[in-house]
Amino acid sequence: MTGLNRHTGGPIDSEAQLAQDIGDLLSTPIGSRLTNREYGAEITGLIDRPQNAETALLLCAAAAKAINRWFASRLKITRCTPVFDASGAGALVLIGYRPDQPQNQPFTLTLPI
């Protein structure tokens, strides 16, 4: 299956399409889509919080909740790790598997937050 790159309009493979879709989900605040108010994740409300264990747990919980709701048939998350650099920039490293792929091959996705 192929999709369209949202920035170039060119074709992308199914893994890139899934990564793009999850990036869109996690960067969309709940309630901001006019046609689907429930779509999105609670991550945007956590961006300016301190970089500590509590925030890491909340980030992973918000990501897992949104992905399980909207992409449960396409991706199962088994591990979530927030990563922050010295400048304060962060990313979520999501590890899981795709149930639609043979032998549930591991899938790793790093998304900026």
Image (cartoon, rainbow, N blue to C red):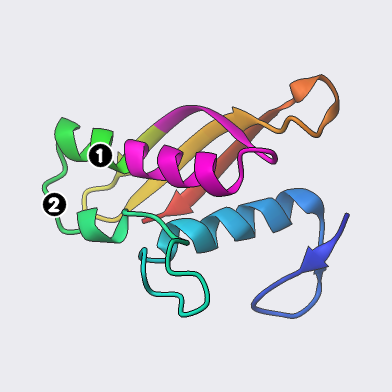
Residue located 62% across and 53% down the image: 19
Q: In this rendering, would 34 be left or right of 85?
A: right
The reply to whether discs 1 and 2 touch (Cβ–Cβ < 8 Å) is yes
> Which mark is drawn over residue 49?
2
x then y, percent, for residue 75:
64, 37
**Tag 2, which secondary structure?**
loop
Please name whichever residue, 89 or 113, is drawn nearer the observer in this view of the structure: 113
x then y, percent, for residue 109:
56, 43
Please name whichever residue, 57 or 36, is drawn nearer the observer in this view of the structure: 36
| Picture quadrant of residue 32 | bottom left
x then y, percent, for residue 71:
61, 45
> Which mark is drawn over residue 58?
1
Q: Quadrant of the C terminus?
A: bottom left
Q: CA distance from mark 1 to mark 2?
A: 10 Å
As drawn, the residue found furthest toward the left would be 50
Residue 25 is one of the magenta-drawn residues: no
Q: In this rendering, would 109 be left or right of 84?
A: right
Q: Give the mark nearest the N terminus, 1 or 2.
A: 2
Q: Which portion, as a residue range, is magenta?
A: 60-80
| Picture quadrant of residue 84 | top left
Residue type at mark 2 is Arg
Q: How many callouts does the rendering have?
A: 2
Q: Is residue 67 above or below residue 33?
A: above
**Tag 1, which secondary structure?**
helix
> Which mark is drawn over residue 28?
none
Q: In this rendering, would 97 be left or right of 13?
A: left
